[in-house]
């Protein structure tokens, strides 16, 4: 059940008029001729940016934790994929992120087509102007979990070895389930809406993995050699069995080569 036990209150227009950021003032053109007349106030409805707009009941520790869990898709998108592109420039990660973007566009299209309302608690959350089926958070996280699992189990990229593979798979699936639960607990979605989002995420995640690694994979060398790939140093390491060891060995070899050149230069001088 939704944990919030608050009641909606009608806003006090007297207090509202004292805050200029909450209203739009429209002056009568004849106001200067008759200063005793009051200006006509037109109140515009406000809408919050929903990127990090997650509410929970004050004092509810579980709700506080689940509110942070609801922000995991934001952390993955901004902190994970953006930083990964800056420092790694991997084609697999780029197509992974592209698939998540396509998945969210599909989610928005379905929401606008079905137009299923959120639960009644949307009034307290100020979310009744948006649709709830399917849950975009659940769809995002289960798409991420499926694609990440397939990458890891197929050994693409070679980041995880056999000993740490299953431990690595526990985190995305546990976060996906917690995110799905958080959206119901906090009152943003019904159980049916999060289950629909999770199912769609699993379907699209598996489908996109097949498209990328069966149909688009052959174009990776062309992307690497393209002006875009050369300018941004885009690369594909999915054919390397152990990327971390490969980079480690090459870094050591480069350091030893540089040290040998410096030693030869000092001797010749």
Image (cartoon, grey):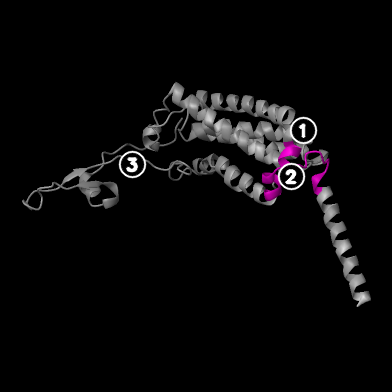
Q: Which residue sits furthest front? A: 227
Q: Quadrant of the C terminus?
A: bottom right
Residue 153: mark: 1
Label 3 residue SS: loop
Q: Which mark is residue 235?
A: 2
The answer to whether mark 3 and mark 1 are in CB contact below 8 A is no
Residue 122 placement (x, y as % from top left): 40, 32
- Residue at x-position 55% and y-position 43%: 74
Return the residue nearer the eye: 266 or 19: 266
The foreground one among 38 and 14 is 38
Q: Which badge, 3 or 2, is on the more N-terminal residue?
A: 3
Between tags 3 and 2, which lies in front? 2
The Cα–Cα distance between marks 1 and 2, rounded to whole angstroms, is 21 Å
Q: Say whether residue 239 is magenta.
A: yes
Segment colored magenta? 220-244
- First in sequence: mark 1 vs mark 2: 1
Which of the two residues, 243 or 228, is positioned nearer the viewer here? 228
Q: Is residue 165 left or right of residue 190?
A: right
Q: Indicate the secondary structure of the residue bearing disc 2.
A: loop
Query: Is 58 left or right of 17, judged from the image as shown?
Result: right
């Amino acid at each position: 059940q939704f944990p919030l036990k608050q009641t909606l209150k009608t806003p006090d227009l007297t207090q509202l008029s004292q805050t200029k950021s909450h209203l739009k003032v429209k002056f009568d053109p004849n106001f200067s001729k008759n200063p005793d007349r009051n200006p006509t106030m037109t109140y515009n409805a406000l809408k919050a940016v929903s990127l990090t707009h997650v509410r929970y009941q004050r004092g509810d520790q579980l709700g506080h934790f689940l509110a942070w869990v609801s922000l995991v898709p934001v952390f993955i998108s901004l902190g994970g994929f953006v930083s990964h592109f800056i420092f790694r420039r991997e084609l697999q990660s780029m197509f992974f992120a592209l698939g998540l973007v396509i998945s969210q566009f599909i989610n928005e299209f379905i929401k606008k087509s079905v137009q299923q309302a959120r639960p009644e608690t949307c009034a307290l959350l100020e979310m009744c102007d948006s649709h709830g089926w399917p849950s975009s958070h659940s769809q995002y996280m289960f798409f991420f979990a499926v694609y990440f699992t397939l990458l890891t189990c197929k050994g693409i990229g070679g980041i995880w070895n056999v000993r740490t593979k299953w431990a690595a798979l526990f985190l995305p699936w546990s976060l996906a389930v917690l995110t799905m639960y958080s959206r119901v607990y906090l009152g943003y979605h019904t159980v049916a809406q999060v289950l629909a989002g999770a199912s769609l995420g699993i379907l699209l995640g598996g489908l996109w993995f097949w498209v990328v690694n069966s149909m688009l994979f052959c174009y990776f060398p062309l992307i690497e050699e393209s002006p875009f790939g050369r300018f941004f140093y885009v690369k594909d390491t999915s054919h390397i069995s152990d990327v971390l060891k490969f980079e480690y060995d090459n870094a050591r070899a480069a350091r030893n080569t540089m040290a040998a050149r410096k030693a030869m230069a000092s001797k010749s001088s």
